[in-house]
Structures are given as structure tokens and as C-alpha cells.
Image (cartoon, rainbow, N blue to C red):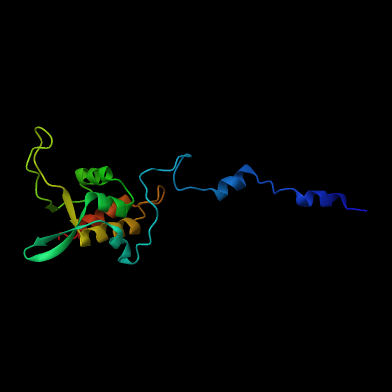
Amino acid sequence: MKDPLDLFNEMPDIKSKRQKHEENVQDFPGNTKPKNRGASIDRASHEWLNGLSHQVYNVKGVEKKFYSIGALATALGRKPVTIRSWEAKGWIPGAAFRTPPPRKEQIPGADIKGRRLYTEAQVVFLVETAIACNLNSQKNSDWKRFRKEIADNYPTH
């Protein structure tokens, strides 16, 4: 004679709503994943710099690598508009370098400027500081520390 409880061994495991929720805990509210966060990259080694597009310019006879605001945004897992916003709010200094300005006026009435350029040291510093301050976490990010680190230690060149 078979044990009647053996019938239940083949049934799938039924989990409570709480158990399902705990398995799917997210670092953002709601069900929609944020669109401005890139994939996590191991930034301990600086190999991630090799994947970023850059330009080389001569500065006082020395060739230097420069990264656009788009490359910086990619490294930080954000969008360029976010980086411009941080700059406008004074959270990060304005770009010290720019590409040569265009020959013609791009936007009527606006100042003619080149595109923002950041040195390799600035990109590395911003990425490492963002990681140290946990900026990709909605709950545990330390913006006060981030702004202080930028104010105290941001490389100018």
C-alpha cells in the first residue's frame, strides 16, 4: 500500500508572496528598472578605460588622452544630461578642457563653445569616488561625501 503523502512529493514548491519578494529585492522602488544605470563593471583595475572612446590632444607638447562627456557618462553608468546637471549644480567642476569651437553658430544666440573633455585622471577619480560613495544604490548612496571628495581632491589636469 502506498503512503498517501507520497502524492505531495511531486507537487511544485509553493512560496509565499513574502518569500518571492525577498528573492527579488531591488535597489530601486517600483517595478520599472531605472534607465540611466548601466551594467555593473569591475572598476578595480582600470581596464574598463580601454572600452571608452577617447581623443588624443597635444597639451603644451605632451600628448594626453581626453574623454567626452558621453564616455564619462558611460563609465559612471549615467547619461550625459546627468553629468551636465551635476556640473550645473556645482557637484562636479566644469570641464577644464574643450574641443576647438565649431566655425559656425550652432544654436542662435548661444555662446560658441567646444565639447567638454575630461582627462583620464578626472574620469578615473570620478568613477572611483562614485563607487566609494555607493552612488548606484538608491538607498545607501552618500552624496554629501561624494561632493566633499570632489571639492577636496578633484584633479584639475
Residue farthest to the top, as pictured? 108
Compared across the picture, whether 16 is left or right of 107 comes to right
Q: Is residue 15 visible?
A: yes
Q: Is residue 18 above or below residue 157?
A: above
Quadrant of the image containing the C terminus: bottom left
At x 22%, y 57%, the residue is 54
Q: Is residue 106 above or below residue 119?
A: above
Residue farthest to the front, as pictured? 103
At x 51%, y 48%, the residue is 25
Percent across and percent down for residue 121 are 21, 62
Q: Nearer the viewer, residue 98 or 84?
A: 98
Compared across the picture, whether 46 is left or right of 140 comes to left
Q: Nearer the viewer, residue 80 or 102?
A: 102
Percent across and percent down for residue 102 are 9, 44
Q: Is residue 49 above or below residue 18?
A: below
Residue farthest to the right, as pictured? 1
Q: How many marks?
A: 0
At x 66%, y 46%, the residue is 15
Compared across the picture, whether 138 is left or right of 19 comes to left
Q: Is residue 33 above or below residue 122?
A: above
At x 15%, y 63%, the residue is 64
Q: Nearer the viewer, residue 14 or 66?
A: 66
Q: Is residue 94 visible?
A: no
- Residue 82: quadrant of the picture: top left
Compared across the picture, whether 80 is left or right of 31 comes to left
